[in-house]
């Protein structure tokens, strides 16, 4: 993905802190499902499961809301993903 850039980085990042106690995919919990990893929407803070999870709720949130950027909600990871531009970038690039 070298050379690709996110065209939404300046306008789509409003939330970066993951609230305590919210490290779960509510859609999966309601459906009795499981997830592999979690992603947080940087526009509204929605927490959803990743594309490797059966529900793919973070991607579903993007499709229904139009919010393009998610932040990993995994401890020790520091990257973001733009669904619209299909590009990953480091939190260090945002600072």
Image (tube, grey):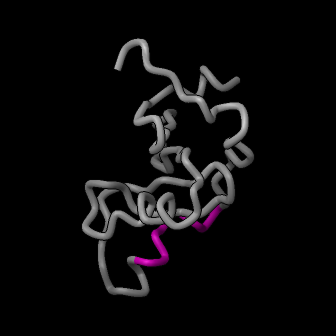
Q: Position of residue 76 (x, y in %)?
A: 47, 37
Q: Nearer the viewer, residue 54 or 74?
A: 54
The stretch in magenta equals 20-27
Tell me the quarter of the image containing the N terminus. top left
In this view, 41 is above or below 86: below
Magenta segment main secondary structure: loop
Q: Position of residue 2 (x, y in %)?
A: 37, 14
For image coordinates 58% across by 66% down, the residue present is 22
Q: Nearer the viewer, residue 27 or 5?
A: 5
Query: So how many labels did they put on this image?
Result: 0
For image coordinates 55% across by 54% down, the residue present is 40
23 falls in the magenta region: yes
80 falls in the magenta region: no
Q: Nearer the viewer, residue 7 or 17?
A: 7
State whether residue 47 appears in this view: yes
Tell me the quarter of the image containing the C terminus. top right
For image coordinates 40% across by 36% down, the residue present is 86
For image coordinates 45% across by 60% down, the residue present is 58
In this view, 28 is above or below 52: below
Q: Nearer the viewer, residue 28 or 86?
A: 86
Is 15 left, or right, of 72 in this rendering?
A: right
Q: Position of residue 92 (x, y in %)?
A: 60, 22
Q: Position of residue 27 (x, y in %)?
A: 44, 78
State whether residue 76 appears in this view: no
| Extreme residue toward the top, this view | 3
In this view, 46 is above or below 33: above
């Amino acid at each position: 993905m070298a050379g690709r850039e996110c065209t939404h980085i300046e306008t789509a990042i409003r939330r970066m802190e993951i609230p305590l106690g919210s490290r779960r995919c509510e859609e999966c919990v309601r459906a009795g499902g499981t997830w592999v990893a979690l992603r947080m929407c940087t526009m509204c803070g929605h927490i959803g499961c990743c594309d490797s999870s059966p529900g793919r709720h973070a991607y579903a949130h993007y499709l229904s809301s139009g919010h393009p950027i998610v932040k990993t909600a995994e401890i020790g990871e520091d990257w973001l993903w733009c669904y619209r531009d299909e590009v990953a970038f480091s939190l260090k690039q945002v600072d």
